[in-house]
Image (tube, coloured by chain):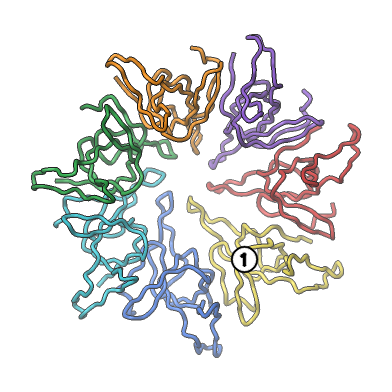
Chain colours: A green, B cyan, C blue, D yellow, E red, F purple, G orange
Amino acid sequence: MAFRKFLPMFDRVLVERLAAETVTKGGIMLPEKSQGKVLQATVVAVGPGSVNQKGNLQPMSVKVGEKVLLPEYGGTKVILDNKDYFLFRDADILGKYVD
Amino acid sequence: MAFRKFLPMFDRVLVERLAAETVTKGGIMLPEKSQGKVLQATVVAVGPGSVNQKGNLQPMSVKVGEKVLLPEYGGTKVILDNKDYFLFRDADILGKYVD
Amino acid sequence: MAFRKFLPMFDRVLVERLAAETVTKGGIMLPEKSQGKVLQATVVAVGPGSVNQKGNLQPMSVKVGEKVLLPEYGGTKVILDNKDYFLFRDADILGKYVD
Amino acid sequence: MAFRKFLPMFDRVLVERLAAETVTKGGIMLPEKSQGKVLQATVVAVGPGSVNQKGNLQPMSVKVGEKVLLPEYGGTKVILDNKDYFLFRDADILGKYVD
Amino acid sequence: MAFRKFLPMFDRVLVERLAAETVTKGGIMLPEKSQGKVLQATVVAVGPGSVNQKGNLQPMSVKVGEKVLLPEYGGTKVILDNKDYFLFRDADILGKYVD
Amino acid sequence: MAFRKFLPMFDRVLVERLAAETVTKGGIMLPEKSQGKVLQATVVAVGPGSVNQKGNLQPMSVKVGEKVLLPEYGGTKVILDNKDYFLFRDADILGKYVD
Amino acid sequence: MAFRKFLPMFDRVLVERLAAETVTKGGIMLPEKSQGKVLQATVVAVGPGSVNQKGNLQPMSVKVGEKVLLPEYGGTKVILDNKDYFLFRDADILGKYVD
């Protein structure tokens, strides 16, 4: 795991957007694009989750390796080893693709 | 279910707007339109629900297959297998049609 | 009940504004108008109520058939069987007329 | 009680502003005016109170018949039997006159 | 106490600003002025306090007769028996002078 | 203590900004300035603390006599015995200097 | 530890941005820059943590000596012994680098 070195904090999720054209089991998947941004991504690292007002840890909803659909806006660009990654909050991820 | 593959997260609901003219038991139903947008839709997939401040899961209010009335504004367009779907929050859905 | 078919969600209330001139026991009642909008209405359908932070269901304050006073602003127009209805939140209804 | 018929909802209070000049035990009381609006009023009807996040009913702080001081702004005009009344939230009433 | 008649509601405090120049034990005290407004005042009447989300009454922090320092802004002017008073929230009062 | 007379309320802290140049054990300390304002200060008086939603008193984090670092903005100027002091909220004080 | 003297308060973290070019075990690491600002930093001092609504102390997520990734915006500059440091809230730190 190239990014064992970077641990997102709280409920942040580090994702890598899919390449423009990805070959999957089901054939070629042209990721959904919006204003040139690929909205499908793979989860690369997840934070420990955040604590709610009562002090309880809210577990994360996505796991490393899952394919997710990102919102069009938001996210923070993070460059690690010269590659572009993005940090989103767990709650802002729209959904995930389950086989 | 074409969209078993896409799971909305938290309290999000994936819906498909009704076609312009739908034949129902009660005869032809011209879905309500507002600025050209059909406001009736079918629930295609639902998230697990969201957790409130106390850590309790709020169950969803709509189920897959139900006919619902969408608000005029809001919602996020999601393209899956080249078809348009929309994501709404459970709390933003105005009501449902029960036979 | 023509609208058994439409169930408002959460704490929403479906109302039908009174006709411009309604004959009641007490004689002709000219409903209060504000900018041409009749502010008196009859409750046609009510949602199940909303859940507060603690997970408790807040019961609704109005029942089907009651006469209520609507605020001047707000509300969502809903066309059902080609008739105009309006959705308000329970908390936004100003008061009700009790005989 | 002319307005037994109108019940404010939740924590709303129905008040009638004092006439421009009111004779009281203590002699003539020229109600305080601000931009032509009389700020003293009599409570005509009160709602049941509102429920807080914990589901507990917050009792109302004013009772029918009490003399209160209204804030300069806010309030909703309500015409009942062709007379002007005003709806305020319990929490917005500034104070009351106790003999 | 001229104002036993006026009871502020909830956590409101009725104050009277000190006269421009007040002789105190410690000699003449020129009250602090800001834009011509005297910021020192005497507490004339206090409300019962406000109730927090849990339904517990928050006791007031100032008592009738105490000398307090007012913030430069905020407060509601109230005319009682032709004299100017001001209503502030308990939480907005900056501090008090203790001998 | 010249200011035993003034008690800040709730979680407010009364501070006196350090003179432009202060000689300390460690030699001359040129206080940090920002736009001509000295940001180091001494705590002169503290309020009792504020009560949270549950009614619990949040103890103060600074004590009289401590040296603290003020934020660049905010604070309320208070003139006591013709000297300038400033009121800050406990939570807005950035940090303290411990020997 | 040059900065044992400065203790950040509540959930604040004092950090020192990495020098433009830092030699690490893994070779030369060119810290990520954004608008000329180095976004990698070392934690120099941490506050005690903040208390949530229930009065429970939220422990800090970073420790002195850890390498962290700062957000592009926010933070308060603090000059200590003529060197530039920055204060961030624990919750605003994006992530940390673990070997």
Q: Is residue A82 left or right of residue E92?
A: left
Q: Is residue G27 left or right of residue F93?
A: left
Residue at 27%, 27% (x, y): give it: A81
Residue at 83%, 40% (x, y): give it: E31
Residue at 44%, 58% (x, y): give it: C58
Q: In which quarter of the image is the N terminus of chain A?
A: top left
Above/below status of C37 relative to E91: below
Q: Is residue A38 left or right of residue F47?
A: left
In the image, residue C17 lies at what x, y percent? 46, 79
Above/below status of E70 relative to C68: above
Residue underneath mark 1: D75
Element carrying mark 1: loop
In the image, residue C8 lies at what x, y percent? 36, 67
Residue at 54%, 78% (x, y): give it: C35
Above/below status of E24 relative to A92: above
In the image, residue B93 lies at what x, y percent? 34, 62
Q: Give the mark count.
A: 1
Q: In this view, does D92 lie to the left or right of G6?
A: right
In which quadrant of the rendered view does residue C30 lie? bottom right
Three-letter code, disc 1: Gly
In the image, residue D46 lies at what x, y percent? 61, 66
